[in-house]
């Protein structure tokens, strides 16, 4: 599995300052020294209404780091943001307009918040979004996502039988990593794109796998070469009951076989 929290190693500009106004995320404040915002706000700092996002958080190049600053909602972000980290806060919901017009945003990481509600079109309008991390929240419904996704991690949530749209991942032809560990899912979210390399569904409620879940029953020469990492351990299923479901895979899924 890839590291979930990559750290940007190259920055193309100094930290920048923007207003907290959603109407104009790019307005530069005057009279504030850039050197005063190199360091992130300590955990004792409290969000103040109207405080510029890049004073409360740390903005480096296209990355905005708002980890552990007691946020209760998604802050206004600079339009040039490519990576947003809002981990370890108290965000409870994601609204339709929270990421509006963020046309360069590639990664959103909201690990360890209190998110229970996400507007279904909160992310679908992001044209280049590739990675979404919602680990350790209270999400019960996975929202619609754009087709450019390469990584989705919604592990440790409350996603149940109706929490994933039908054919939710069908058009994500570049999806590589899908992590839905520790939820209440009772079926595999098919069809799965051929690009998928890693599928983690351990500790859910999956009780059955169909023979065409991974393989193409109409093409006996079909081999799903990319999918080498399937985790189904911790589910109430005996994988040996459907041996034909794995004939096209390079490796048998990890899980109970007795």
Image (cartoon, helix red, strand yellow):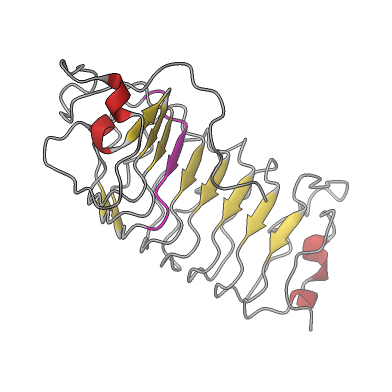
Report the front residue among 147 and 178: 178
Q: Position of residue 80 (x, y in %)?
A: 36, 21
Report the front residue among 253 and 242: 253
- In the shown orientation, is residue 144 left or right of residue 43? right
Q: Position of residue 50 (x, y in %)?
A: 12, 35
View extreme (right): residue: 221
Q: Is residue 108 magenta?
A: yes
- Chief secondary structure of the magenta span? loop
Q: Is residue 174 magenta?
A: no
Seen at 27% across and 56% down, the residue is 90
Which quarter of the picture shows residue 30? top left
Which quarter of the picture shows residue 48? top left
Residue 170 in view of the camera: no
Rendered position, 4 above or below 201: above
- In the shown orientation, is residue 199 left or right of residue 122? right
Rendered position, 26 above or below 244: above
Rendered position, 131 above or below 89: above
| Range of residues picked out in magenta | 103-112
Q: Position of residue 172 (x, y in %)?
A: 56, 38
Quadrant for the C terminus in the image: bottom right
Residue 257 in view of the camera: yes
Numbered label tally: 0
């Amino acid at each position: 599995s890839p590291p979930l929290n990559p750290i940007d190693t190259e920055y193309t500009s100094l930290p920048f300052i923007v207003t907290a106004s959603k109407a104009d995320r790019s307005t530069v404040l005057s009279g504030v020294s850039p050197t005063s915002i190199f360091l992130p706000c300590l955990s004792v700092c409290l969000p103040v209404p109207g405080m510029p996002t890049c004073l409360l958080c740390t903005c480096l190049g296209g990355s905005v780091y708002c980890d552990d600053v007691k946020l209760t909602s998604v802050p206004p972000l600079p339009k040039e943001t490519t990576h947003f980290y809002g981990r370890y806060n108290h965000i409870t919901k994601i609204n339709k307009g929270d990421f509006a017009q963020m046309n360069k945003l590639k990664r959103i990481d909201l690990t360890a918040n209190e998110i229970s509600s996400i507007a279904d079109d909160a992310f679908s309008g992001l044209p280049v979004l590739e990675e979404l991390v919602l680990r350790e929240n209270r999400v019960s419904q996975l929202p619609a996502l754009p087709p450019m996704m390469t990584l989705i991690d919604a592990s440790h949530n409350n996603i149940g039988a109706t929490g994933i749209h039908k054919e939710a991942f069908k058009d994500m032809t570049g999806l590589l990593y899908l992590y839905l560990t520790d939820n209440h899912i009772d079926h595999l979210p098919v069809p799965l794109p051929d690009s998928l390399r890693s599928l983690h569904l351990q500790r859910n409620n999956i009780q059955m796998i169909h023979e065409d879940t991974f393989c193409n029953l109409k093409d006996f020469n079909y081999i799903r070469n990319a999918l080498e990492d399937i985790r189904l351990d911790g589910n109430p299923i005996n994988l040996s009951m459907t041996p034909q479901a794995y004939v096209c895979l390079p490796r048998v899924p990890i899980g109970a076989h007795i």
